[in-house]
C-alpha cells in the first residue's frame, strides 16, 4: 500500500488513485503470504509440540486470517478508486472502514504480531535460532519512538518495522529448513483392557 501508517480515508483514496495497479498487486501478494502462513501451521504444530509453544502456532493461525482480511482492505481501496466511481460517495464507506470497522480487524493483527514474537521465543528455546532473533522485536518500539521525535514519516517507520518482522520470520524459516529433524513427541499412553487380571474400562 502507498499509505503505510495512514488512516485518513481521503488521503488513502488520493494515494491509491495515483497507483491503483500497484495496490492491487500488493493485495494479491498479501493474500498469497496469508495462504503460505496457513500452510506452515501443520508443520509448526509438529515441530512446536510443547503446549506453551503451541500458543505461538495458534496466534499465527489467527494472524494469517488478519493478514488476509487486511488484504481485502487494499482491494476495497482499489475498487473504490476505479474510473467512473463516485469517490465522494465512497468516502463515508472508507471512513467507517478505517475507524469503527477497523476495530474488528485489530485483534487479528495483534494476534499476528504476538504470534511472530511467540514463534521467535519458542524457536530460541528449541535452539533453532539464537536470542538475537526475538531481540529484534525490541527494536520496533525504539524505532517508533525515535521516528516520532526525529520527524520521520509514518510510512518509513511502518516499512522499517515490517522489515524487521520479515527479517525475523525469514531467519526462523531458514533455521527450520536447516534443522529438519522433528523433535520426538511424548508417546501416547496405551490402554489395555486387561492388566493383572483386572478389567480397566
Image (cartoon, rainbow, N blue to C red):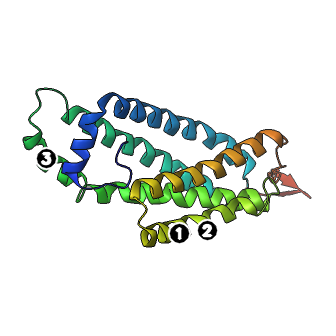
Towards the viewer: 197 or 121: 121
Q: Position of residue 114 (x, y in %)?
A: 55, 61
At 42% across and 41% down in the image, what residue appears? 68
At 82% across and 40% down in the image, what residue appears? 178
> Regarding mark 3 in the picture, which secondary structure is present there?
helix
> Regarding mark 2 in the picture, which secondary structure is present there?
helix
Towards the viewer: 152 or 26: 152
The answer to whether one can see residue 50 in this image is no
Q: Position of residue 140 (x, y in %)?
A: 55, 64
To which residue does mark 2 refer? 138
101 displayed left or right of 149: left
Q: Are marks 3 and 2 in contact (CB under 8 Å)?
A: no
103 displayed left or right of 188: left
Q: Position of residue 169 (x, y in %)?
A: 64, 48
To which residue does mark 1 refer? 141
- Residue 112, disc: none
Q: Quadrant of the C terminus?
A: bottom right
Q: CA distance from mark 1 to mark 2?
A: 6 Å
Q: Position of residue 99 (x, y in %)?
A: 24, 59
The answer to whether one can see residue 91 in this image is yes
Give the crowd class for mark 3: few <14, some 14-19, many >=20 residues within 10 Å: some
- Across the whole image, how many numbered discs are drawn on residues? 3
Give the crowd class for mark 2: few <14, some 14-19, many >=20 residues within 10 Å: few
Q: Are marks 1 and 2 in contact (CB under 8 Å)?
A: yes
At 27% across and 35% down in the image, what residue appears? 18
Towards the viewer: 18 or 189: 18
> Regarding mark 1 in the picture, which secondary structure is present there?
helix
Earlier sequence position, callout 1 versus callout 3: 3
To which residue does mark 3 refer? 91
Amino acid at each position: 500500500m502507498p499509505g503505510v501508517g495512514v488512516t485518513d480515508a481521503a488521503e488513502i483514496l488520493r494515494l491509491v488513485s495515483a497507483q491503483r495497479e500497484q495496490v492491487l498487486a500488493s493485495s494479491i501478494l498479501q493474500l498469497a503470504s496469508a495462504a503460505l502462513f496457513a500452510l506452515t501451521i501443520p508443520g509448526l504444530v509438529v515441530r512446536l509440540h510443547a503446549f506453551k509453544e503451541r500458543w505461538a502456532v495458534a496466534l499465527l493461525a489467527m494472524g494469517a486470517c488478519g493478514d488476509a482480511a487486511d488484504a481485502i482492505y487494499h482491494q476495497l481501496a482499489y475498487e473504490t478508486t476505479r474510473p467512473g466511481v463516485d469517490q465522494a460517495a465512497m468516502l463515508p464507506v472508507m471512513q467507517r472502514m478505517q475507524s469503527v470497522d477497523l476495530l474488528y480487524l485489530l485483534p487479528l493483527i495483534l494476534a499476528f504480531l504476538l504470534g511472530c514474537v511467540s514463534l521467535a521465543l519458542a524457536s530460541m528455546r528449541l535452539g533453532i535460532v539464537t536470542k538475537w532473533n526475538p531481540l529484534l522485536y525490541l527494536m520496533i518500539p525504539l524505532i517508533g519512538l525515535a521516528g516520532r521525535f526525529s520527524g520521520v514519516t509514518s510510512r518509513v517507520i511502518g516499512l522499517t518495522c515490517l522489515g524487521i518482522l520479515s527479517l525475523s520470520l525469514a531467519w526462523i524459516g531458514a533455521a527450520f529448513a536447516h534443522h529438519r529433524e522433528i523433535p520426538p513427541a511424548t508417546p501416547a499412553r496405551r490402554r489395555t483392557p486387561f492388566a493383572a487380571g483386572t478389567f480397566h474400562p
